[in-house]
Image (cartoon, rainbow, N blue to C red):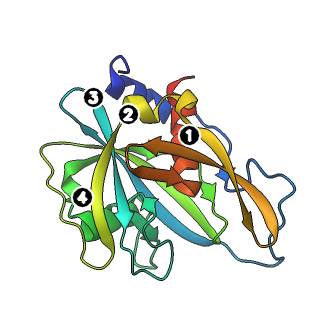
């Protein structure tokens, strides 16, 4: 268990590391030229659990066209009506898992992350206050679950795997947790948080 995890979390947003991407482990990986990144935001929500702080994650519905069944943060595209990435992350979290925006204390942003699917994601770090009973959005979220911050915050828990994409081999981070396969952008963003927490 991390000592005084809330103090560590607050310190983590004071660090200003470089942006991350799905290509961090693949400097030679080539994507099609001219692609335009779309802005998105996700909520990295930290909830005080019974014995440890916990990170709230979702498993996407199996019938979705994109990233079906994958583990993800609550979040999505930043709409024109959203005044900020923070507002977008909170709006999406309320829509997807029933988390009231008023229950979240926004602490700041983690490093922006570029995904292989063409998004520039702003991870918004926030503390969730009070009891929270998830209400998964039907058709979009299959499950809401939590992972101990002590697990997420330990860089040694992450491993690197390889798969073929666009005719090239791509290496990426994986963070196993029980039956959940946390990988790709979600694992990379969590790895960035772990690097901050262990600094």
Tell me: residue 95, above or below residue 125: below
Describe the element under mark 2 as helix, strand or loop: helix
3D distance between C-alphas at marks 4 and 2: 21 Å
**Residue at x-position 35% and y-position 21%:** 1
Mark 1 vs mark 3, CA separation in Å? 18 Å
Give the residue pinned by disc 3.
52
Q: Is residue 167 above or below residue 155?
A: below
Q: Tell me which label, 4 or 3, sits earlier in the chain.
A: 3
159 lies left or right of 65: right
Residue 16: image location, x then y, percent: 60, 37
Does residue 25 appear in this view? yes
Q: Secondary structure at mark 1?
A: helix
Q: Do labels 2 and 1 touch, CB within 8 Å?
A: no
Q: CA distance from mark 2 to mark 3?
A: 7 Å
Q: Which mark is residue 70?
A: none
Q: Nearer the viewer, residue 9 or 159?
A: 159
Of residues 79 and 47, the one nearer the viewer is 47
- Of callouts 2 and 3, the N-terminal one: 3
Residue indicated by mark 1: 191
Q: Quadrant of the C terminus?
A: top right
User: Which numbered disc, 4 or 2, marks the residue closer to the eye?
Assistant: 2
Under circle 3, the secondary element is: loop
Where is residue 119? Give x, y as percent: 60, 69
- The residue furthest top is 3
Labels 2 and 3 touching (C-beta < 8 A): yes
Secondary structure beneath dot 4 equals helix
Q: Which residue is mark 2?
A: 149
> Is the residue under label 3 in contact with that under label 4 (CB below 8 Å)?
no
Task: Count neighbours of disc 4 (C-alpha within 10 A) and say few if under 14, some if 14 to 19, many if 20 or more.
Answer: some
* Residue at which label 4 appears: 101
């Amino acid at each position: 268990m991390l000592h005084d995890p809330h103090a560590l979390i607050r310190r983590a947003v004071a660090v200003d590391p470089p942006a991350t991407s799905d290509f961090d482990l693949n400097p030679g990986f080539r994507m099609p030229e001219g692609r335009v990144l779309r802005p998105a935001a996700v909520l990295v929500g930290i909830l005080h659990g019974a014995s440890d702080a916990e990170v709230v994650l979702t498993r996407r519905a199996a019938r979705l066209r994109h990233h079906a069944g994958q583990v993800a943060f609550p979040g999505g595209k930043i709409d024109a009506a959203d005044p900020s990435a923070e507002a977008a992350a909170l709006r999406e979290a309320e829509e997807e898992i029933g988390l009231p925006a008023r229950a979240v204390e926004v602490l700041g942003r983690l490093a922006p992350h570029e995904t292989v699917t063409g998004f520039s994601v702003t991870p918004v770090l926030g503390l969730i206050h009070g009891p929270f009973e998830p209400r998964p959005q039907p058709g979009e979220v299959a499950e809401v679950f939590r992972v101990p911050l002590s697990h997420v915050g330990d860089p040694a828990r992450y491993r690197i795997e390889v798969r073929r994409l666009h005719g090239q081999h791509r290496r990426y981070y994986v963070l196993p947790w029980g039956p959940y396969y946390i990988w790709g952008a979600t694992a990379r963003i969590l790895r960035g948080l772990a690097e901050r927490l262990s600094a």
